[in-house]
Amino acid sequence: MANLELYELEGCPYCAKVTSKLDELDMEYESHMVPRSHDERTEVEEVSGQTGVPVLVDPENGVEGMPESDDIVEYLEEEYGS
């Protein structure tokens, strides 16, 4: 089973797009809710080099901090889709 981590913000439509895909693929993941203020998002910035969310981490495949919901959804489909 994949060891995925997702940095997300409650109410974020881009994050919801990614969580929907994860649910569709029936994948477990660890959620990290980030603060609303970009200034306080040090954890996600350390992972991805930027403060936007969502950010996906998939250490088993060498993904250390993938930003952009469309890219994440495409990656999930390619890597874990049937």
Image (cartoon, rainbow, N blue to C red):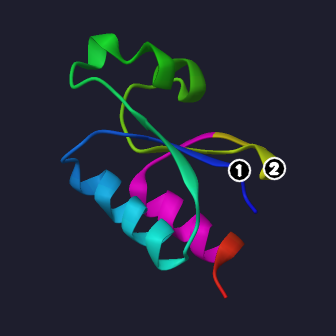
Which picture quadrant has residue 79? bottom right
- Badge 2 element: helix
- Assess disc 1: are there few (<14), some (14-19) or many (≥20) residues with their C-alpha within 10 Å of its C-alpha: few
Quarter occupied by residue 10: top left
Please give the residue where the numbered disc 1 appears in the rendered image.
Answer: 3
28 in relation to 46, above or below: below
**Residue 60 - label:** 2
The residue that appears at 44% across and 13% down in the rendered structure is 42
- 73 part of magenta stretch: yes
Numbered disc 1: secondary structure: loop
| Image point (49%, 67%), residue name | 22
- Asked whether, in this view, residue 61 is left or right of residue 67, the answer is right
Residue 63, which numbered label?
none
Quarter of the image with the C terminus in it: bottom right
Residue at horizontal 51%, vertical 58%? 72
Magenta part of the protein: which range? Answer: 65-78
Q: Amino acid at mark 1?
A: Asn
Locate residue 46, reporting x and y percent.
56, 18
Of residues 33 and 58, the one drawn nearer to the viewer in this rendering:
33
